[in-house]
């Protein structure tokens, strides 16, 4: 079986991770493809996977009854979209739709988090990256909300 | 033959030539006769002044997106199916003024309308359309609010039903349990029989009003062969229906298929023209329009038939809930066959076939349901492999 | 000859007694029947069809006190031709009223419960009669909390009343706006987040929720996360309405006519249809 390690190692989200951690993450990973228009996940779905995007573009959307889907964020290769939950599964508030052909690595959140519980060093490394990603997204969201243009 | 007393539930025979007399009895009682007639090469329902207005000797050929009158070999009075009009045009007119209002110094004056209930006698109501009338009764007369305009016309209406002795091209009344024989809801129901020299009607008496009318005409008890002829005529029609619709658990089927790709397929064809809603005898959606005259002193409120295929129909400030044609076709079909059952306890479809005949692109409601049902079998089969 | 009792499409003339401005495009009108009489008896959450001569009619929730019916109160936002005309009315003008219609908030079933009222934007208007009803009978309920959010401070309605309610010891009021200028001293953040701050026993709580669709969807999710049962969560839905009587078909949401089967629904009843798109 072809190993995903090199693909994983190449993704910026996992940059600098120890090879043995990459191997563990690889046990939860699979390659996925989405055609343009296909959904990575939809509102109400369980957040089963955390996606590392290798190619393409994903739009995060909120569906408004009269406006239709409102695109609030797009993510490209090198970025990630997902929710790392512990304990009870998280259910999505938004949709994520592939805008063009998108190739990604899907990390199964439940098994990933179980492995983090077993190997706390792995957990710490992952959480550092996740926290950074969230902080940046949060800052971006605040800027959007603050309406720089008004 | 002398006029003989007839009883409710009786079957009597009326000779064909007595039909004119029947119409005269009804006119004499103050009924406005409305029935099938030919107009611009098509079959409509309109005011009848005499027997001569009926499309005697005419039949019809109907398919998806196709309607033609065809001459019959026999001089039948009722040898055709249903045309683009239905009886709802008279009980629930396409445009109806509800009231007017004046704006005066002392304020708003609302002026209720004068009584305008017309006594209609509907001549030649097919069983599917008879069911459609009883379905609209549920809508307008059995909810928490009653429409008094519909009520007045409906209570005054006389119904002369006509059982179908020949199949219709796009109908599926047998599937929907609405025909080809009228079971109830009529004052009188006729089955037309032409056998060689003989031309007569086997008449069922449905109400005391019907009984009172028929007893003024020369009629006699129906004999067994005559009753048999009527039964055979209807049975022939039932066997040769142009379409069928499997209604097995149809509500559950449609409720779980709101995201079926079939909706995209039909949306690619549907023009959102709304013809289906206009010809459908049970569609009841309407809009309310307030307008004023040029002086600005008098305003009127009109009720007008509306069409759920328009973008406006579901508009709420900010946009329309059903923004895509796909969602609007889905709304029409699922309302007609599924949510209607939860709303009114019966299906909204009577199997008259009009929506199939009068769709410019020949979308067929029976084919759409069949496709959705079959798509589930395909998925199930694939899952087994 | 038909009259208002026999023809449900005939409006009754009402006169404007007072017009108060809530926000730049939202006004509260106080009305009384032109013919005099006892005024309109209604249940909290119901709406009337308001008619402007020559312009048209729109459904507007009643926003006044259901225990004080001598005056009829409506809060209207100017978003279309008719609502703009209503907001342009002056004291002494007349308009037509038909109603009240609709299924109300289940305040009659609330005694013994904690009640959580959650409003977004103008959603506070159809909830205000429920709040009045509950405050008028305060001892019958457990905890009573209001969570209210709007886009900006300028979009908050009933501002003075909110301050009065906040001053009570038996009614907790939490408010927030999405964004504000720096002279705002209240919370900034989305209303759905405030649910975590509310105090209630999920076994004995009834939630009344009204606001934009997205807000209701996510608020309900938060409530469910805190253990509230779907049948104890009530939402008020909005649809295009022409007749208000369940006859014209416009307000349908799946099998429901929002005007007569709603606008208030227990969430478990309407959830599947509410979450479907373009239905």
Image (tube, rainbow, N blue to C red):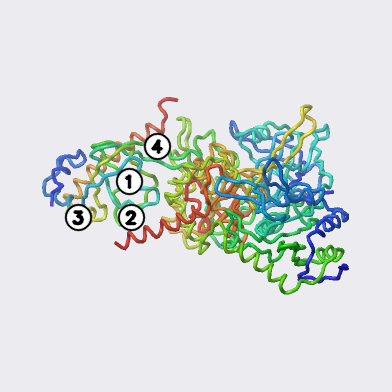
Query: Residue A146: in sight, yes or no?
Result: yes
Task: Quote the CA–CA distance across marks 2 and 4.
Answer: 25 Å
Q: Nearer the viewer, mark 2 or mark 1?
A: 1
Residue under label 1: A40
* Real-space CA distance between mark 4 and mark 1, rounded to the nearest whole angstrom: 14 Å
Tell me the distance, in whole angstroms, between the alpha carbons under discs 4 and 3. 34 Å
Note whether residue C32 is visible: no
Residue ID for mark 3:
A115
Q: Which residue does the numbered mark 4 point to in the structure image? A: A71
Callout in the foreground (2, 4): 4
Question: On the image, numbered disc 2 is attached to which residue?
Answer: A89
Same subunit, labels 2 and 4: the answer reads yes
Distance between the alpha carbons at the discs numbered 2 and 1: 17 Å
Q: x, y (%) of residue C79?
A: 60, 34
Q: Residues within 10 Å of mark 2 (few under 14, many from 20)?
A: some
Which is nearer the N-term, disc 2 or disc 4?
Answer: 4
Q: Nearer the viewer, residue A21 or B136?
A: B136
Q: Are marks 2 and 3 in contact (CB under 8 Å)?
A: no
Secondary structure under badge 2?
loop
Residue at horizontal 51 percent and vertical 49 percent from the top: B330
Between marks 3 and 1, how big is the CA–CA gap? 24 Å
Q: Earlier in the sequence, mark 4 or mark 3?
A: 4
């Amino acid at each position: 079986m072809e190993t995903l390690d090199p693909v994983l190692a190449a993704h910026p989200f996992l940059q600098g991770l120890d090879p043995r951690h990459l191997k563990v993450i690889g046990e939860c990973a699979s390659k996925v493809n989405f055609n343009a228009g296909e959904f990575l996940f939809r509102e109400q779905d369980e957040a089963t996977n955390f996606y590392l995007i290798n190619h393409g573009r994903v739009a995060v959307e909120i569906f408004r009854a009269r406006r239709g889907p409102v695109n609030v964020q797009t993510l490209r290769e090198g970025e990630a979209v997902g929710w790392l939950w512990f304990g009870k599964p998280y259910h999505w508030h938004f949709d994520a739709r592939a805008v063009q052909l998108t190739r990604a690595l899907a990390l199964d959140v439940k098994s990933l988090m179980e492995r983090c519980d077993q190997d706390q060093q792995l957990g710490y490394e992952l959480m550092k990256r996740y926290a950074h990603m969230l902080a940046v997204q949060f800052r971006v969201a605040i800027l959007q909300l603050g309406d720089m243009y008004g | 033959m002398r006029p003989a007393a007839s009883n409710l539930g009786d079957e009597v025979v009326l000779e064909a030539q007595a039909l004119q007399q029947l119409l005269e009895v009804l006119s004499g009682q103050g009924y406005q006769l409305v029935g099938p007639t030919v107009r611009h090469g098509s079959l409509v329902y309109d005011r009848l002044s005499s027997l001569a207005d009926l499309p005697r000797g005419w039949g019809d050929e109907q398919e998806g997106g196709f309607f033609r009158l065809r001459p019959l070999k026999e001089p039948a009075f009722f040898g055709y199916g249903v045309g683009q009009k239905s009886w709802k045009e008279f009980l629930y007119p396409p445009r109806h003024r509800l009231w007017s209002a004046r704006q005066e110094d002392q304020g708003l004056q609302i002026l209720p309308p004068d009584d305008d209930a017309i006594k209609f006698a509907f001549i030649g109501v097919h069983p599917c359309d008879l069911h459609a009338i009883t379905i609209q009764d549920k809508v307008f007369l059995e909810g928490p609010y009653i429409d008094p305009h519909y009520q007045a016309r409906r209570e005054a209406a006389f119904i002369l039903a006509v059982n179908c002795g020949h199949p219709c091209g796009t109908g599926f009344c047998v599937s929907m349990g609405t025909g080809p024989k009228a079971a109830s809801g009529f004052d009188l129901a006729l089955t037309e029989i032409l056998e060689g020299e003989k031309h007569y009607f086997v008449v069922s008496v449905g109400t005391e009003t019907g009984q009172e009318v028929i007893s003024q005409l020369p009629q006699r008890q129906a004999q067994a062969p005559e009753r048999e002829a009527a039964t055979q005529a209807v049975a022939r029609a039932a066997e040769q229906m142009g379409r069928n619709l499997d209604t097995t658990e149809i509500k559950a089927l449609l409720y779980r298929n709101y995201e079926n790709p079939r909706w995209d397929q039909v949306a690619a064809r549907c023009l959102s023209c709304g013809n289906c809603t206009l010809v459908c005898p049970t569609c009841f959606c309407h809009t309310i329009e307030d307008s004023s005259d040029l002086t600005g002193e008098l305003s009127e409120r009109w009720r007008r038939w509306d069409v759920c295929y328009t973008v406006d129909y579901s508009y709420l400030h900010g946009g329309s809930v059903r923004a895509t044609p796909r969602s609007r076709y889905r709304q029409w079909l699922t309302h007609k066959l599924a949510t209607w059952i939860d709303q009114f306890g019966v299906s909204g479809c009577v199997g008259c076939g009009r929506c199939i005949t009068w769709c410019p692109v020949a979308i067929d409601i029976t084919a759409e349901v069949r496709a959705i049902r079959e798509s589930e079998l395909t998925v199930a089969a694939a899952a087994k492999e | 000859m038909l009259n208002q009792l026999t023809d449900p499409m005939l409006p009754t003339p009402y006169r404007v007694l007072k017009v108060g401005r809530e926000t730049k495009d939202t006004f509260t009108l106080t009305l009384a029947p032109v013919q005099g009489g006892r005024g309109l008896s209604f249940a909290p959450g119901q709406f009337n069809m308001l008619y402007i001569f020559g312009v048209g009619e729109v459904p507007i929730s009643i926003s006044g006190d259901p225990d004080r019916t001598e005056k009829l109160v409506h809060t209207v936002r100017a978003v279309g031709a008719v609502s703009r005309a209503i907001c342009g009315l002056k004291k002494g003008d007349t308009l037509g009223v038909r109603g009240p219609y609709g299924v109300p908030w289940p305040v009659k079933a609330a005694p013994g419960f904690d009640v959580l009222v959650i409003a977004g934007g103008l959603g506070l208007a159809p909830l205000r009669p429920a709040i009045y009803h509950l405050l008028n009978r305060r001892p019958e309920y457990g905890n009573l909390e209001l969570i209210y959010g709007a886009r900006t401070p300028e979009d908050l309605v009933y501002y003075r009343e909110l301050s009065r309610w906040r001053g009570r010891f038996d009614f907790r009021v939490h408010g927030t706006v999405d964004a504000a200028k720096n002279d705002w001293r209240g919370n900034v953040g989305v209303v759905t987040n405030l649910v975590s701050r509310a105090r209630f026993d999920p076994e004995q709580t009834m939630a009344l929720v009204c606001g934009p669709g997205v807000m209701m969807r996510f608020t309900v999710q938060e409530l469910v996360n805190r253990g509230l049962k779907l049948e104890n969560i009530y939402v008020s839905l909005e649809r295009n309405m022409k007749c208000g009587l369940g006859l014209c078909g416009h307000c349908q949401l799946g099998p429901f006519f929002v005007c007569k089967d709603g606008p208030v629904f227990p969430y478990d009843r309407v959830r599947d249809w509410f979450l479907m798109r373009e239905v």
